[in-house]
Amino acid sequence: MNELNQACEAFRALLEEQLARIEHMDSTKVDFSSKPVVTIGIIDGDGIGSIIMAHAVKVLETLLADEIAGGSIVLKRIEGLTIENRMALGQSVPADVLAEIKTCDVLLKGPTTTPMGGKMESANVTLRRELDLYANCRPVSIPEKNIDWMFFRENTEGEYVLGSRGVELPGMAVDFKVTTDAGTRRIARAAFEYARNNGKTRVSIVTKANIMKKTDGKFTAIAHEVARDYPGIEVDDWYIDIMTANLVNEAIRDQFQVVLLPNLYGDIITDEAAQIQGGVGTAGSANIGDRFAMFEAIHGSAPRLIEQGLGDYANPASILKATAMLLRHICRTDAAQRLEQALDGCKLTVDVGASTGAEFAEAVLQAL
Ligand code: NAD
């Protein structure tokens, strides 16, 4: 009984904390077109992180050489977000590292390892929460198959916000899923704004609202409420199970354009979408908030690649696509376009027996 009371107390504290979180949501946006100095934080991460990040930094230094020399762009290296340091300190993002990160405007980040089990939260979950990076934007494009998808995954709520704060009773474990009005409204608005500004005519809302009636039910209802402000855009609803099938259904998949989802479904389905594109090594992603933004590959630190001595075959296309998204975000549109064109034009395959990541990156640099 004592354990039950403790669990109820823990739940109460979580509810209070979540209510306080939505009270303090800020929506002041940074205007990068007029900001005199933009600081880009560079974080290597773990595993293949330092290998692919080295290529991305070279590309940034090449594309932004004049602005770096003139001081309007600062590349700031941030150390200490390694699994060794985080484990030693018992902090998913050490306090001094977080303070450094908050001095930057945007981050380019290599993948970070999260230990399975235990209490350590994922560094990404911590960063998304601490920097309020609510929109995870993941593009997938296969022109020859007429596929051009943009996923808008809610990034600060759902199953992840309290993912390491579940409760355990003898013989039972419970995790929590959180969906708020304000959190849903801002990701839905981001998706519809993107659709409107990029000539897209359809937004697909994907949930499991038939089962998760409160949380996903709210997500769907609020997304439709926001949709009313965008009358030219068609809106449809799908359940995540059939949507996973839709992405491999060649008869209909090219009709999807912008896809709006809660956190967990977005995490899972975008790996599927990336695999259709050519593997997780080909997919970049943006984590956007109003004040900060973080750009990274969608994949992890690939520990098996490192264990097998195959780090040279880590594909940098993922982090280079994220780099192009970063450049667009900070209004360096010409540089972004140059990088996108160089990436589109690079036909090398990164794999054992084909090209190394360094060869791929060199070909991109040559094409810039
Ligand atoms: P993973 O994405 O690291 O690897 C999945 C598969 O993809 C592996 O076969 C790997 O070799 C391959 N792969 C990944 N990136 C590649 C690249 N650039 N080029 C070629 N092949 C590539 O997934 P995982 O093994 O489930 O996770 C490893 C660690 O990464 C875990 O600790 C996990 O928590 C963490 N992770 C971090 C992030 C992040 O920082 N954004 C994202 C996902 C997973």
Image (cartoon, helix red, strand yellow):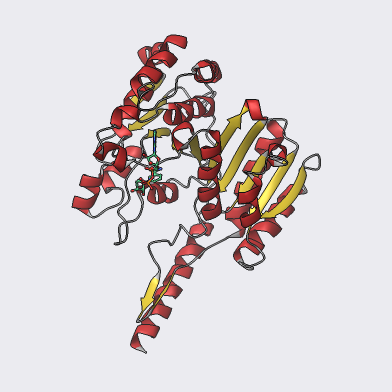
Q: Position of residue 257 (x, y in %)?
A: 68, 38
Quadrant in which ligand 1 is drawn = top left
- Picture layout, residue 177 above or below residue 192: below
- Picture layout, residue 248 above or below residue 105: below
Residue 4, quarter of the rendered image: bottom left
Q: Position of residue 26 (x, y in %)?
A: 53, 48
Residue at image position (48%, 69%) is: 15
Q: Position of residue 59 (x, y in %)?
A: 40, 18
Residue at image position (29%, 32%) is: 310
- How many numbered marks does the figure carry? 0
In the picture as drawn, the residue positioned furthest to the front comes out as 353
Residue at image position (69%, 47%) is: 204
- Picture layout, residue 143 above or below residue 194: above
Q: Tell me: 30 left or right of 11.
A: right
Q: The N terminus appears in which quarter of the rendering?
A: bottom left
Q: Position of residue 247 (x, y in %)?
A: 63, 44
Residue at image position (44%, 51%) is: 129
Residue 12, quarter of the rendered image: bottom left
In the picture as drawn, the residue positioned furthest to the left comes out as 88
| Residue 319 in sight from this viewpoint | yes
| Residue 295 in sight from this viewpoint | no
Residue 171, quarter of the rendered image: bottom left
- Picture layout, residue 329 above or below residue 248: above
In the picture as drawn, the residue positioned furthest to the bottom comes out as 1
Q: Tell me: 124 left or right of 255.
A: left
Q: Tell me: 57 left or right of 325.
A: left
